[in-house]
Image (spheres, helix red, strand yellow):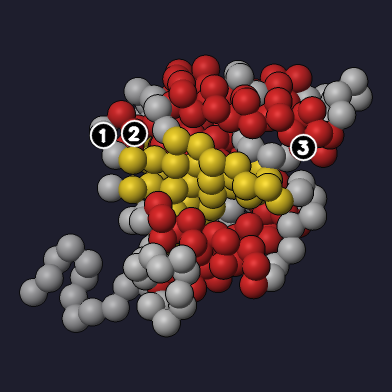
Amino acid sequence: MNLVVVGAHCGDAEIQAGAIAHKYAKAGHNVTFLHLTAGEKGNPPNISVEDYREQKVRESEKVAEVLGVNTITLDYKDAELTFNDEIITHVATWMRKLKPNVVITHWENSIHSDHIMTYRIVHAAQLKAGLPGFDLEGLPAHYYSFYHSENWEDMDGYDPDLFIDVSEEFDTYLEALSHYWFIMNSTSFRYYDYYKALGTVRGCVNRTKYAQTLKFPTGTNVRKGGSLPGYEL
């Protein structure tokens, strides 16, 4: 299986679904984090935006090494993502290259505009990548399904549909997160504490030690047929 986790900034994919990603990478599947921006405008006072971008890309590479996944950071600017054909085409082209069976990305509602834009871009790129009528560098059409993952900034209407047991992966997940400066040093939000606690709380509901959650895109959790799912007549 090819799994791609798309985040607005370096760090989003990891905090939202890093343990799930590690679980599938350990099992031999190909996993890639695709960051649309580096998230460079959250730079510390003593570091320029340009230098912090380089730092975050290096941090993403270290995190990917720990989790056993691949990482790609595009050149779009933090806090300036827009919804247009250029970026949709760019992401759709990457999807044809990476050929994901499943994509995980932000929930559709957020207090951060980049997160909302990322969801909209991934959704639009799904159609463009999947329709053979679009010529994207001569690559064959590829359609993918996607889920939403959990981010503290994206909780408006986020009610998880899937709970994934990541008990065996969680310590490695926390180790990976520790390589991001902002996760360990932010004065505006306690990222490390929050996601450690969130994994614990979701694990309680899942009856496991730790868990991470996913949500179906709006409307796609509807099941149609002539019998109960799993109990066909």
The amino acid sitting under disc 3 is Glu
The amino acid sitting under disc 1 is Gly
N-terminal-most mark, 3 or 2: 2
Question: Looking at this view, is 2 or 221 the one in front?
Answer: 2
Residue at 14% in and 66% down: 231
Contact between labelled residues 2 and 3, with CB atoms less than 8 Å apart: no
Is residue 96 visible to the viewer in this orientation of the structure?
yes
Looking at the image, the residue that sits furthest to the front is: 138
The amino acid sitting under disc 2 is Ala
Q: Is residue 186 above or below residue 127?
A: above
Q: Which residue is mark 1?
A: 28
What label sits on residue 117 in the rendered view? none
Q: How busy is the neighbourhood of tag 3: few (under 14 within 10 Å), some, or many (20 plus)?
A: many
Q: Position of residue 48 (x, y in %)?
A: 87, 29
- 118 left or right, relative to 145: right
Q: Which residue is mark 2?
A: 25
Q: Is residue 6 above or below residue 51?
A: below
Contact between labelled residues 1 and 2, with CB atoms less than 8 Å apart: yes
Q: How busy is the neighbourhood of tag 2: few (under 14 within 10 Å), some, or many (20 plus)?
A: many
N-terminal-most mark, 1 or 3: 1
SS at badge 2: helix
Q: Tell me how far mark 3 sits from mark 2, CA to CA.
A: 27 Å
Q: Tell me how far mark 2 sits from mark 1, CA to CA.
A: 5 Å
What label sits on residue 40 in the rendered view? 3
Residue at 18% in and 63% down: 230
Location of residue 206 by image quarter? top left
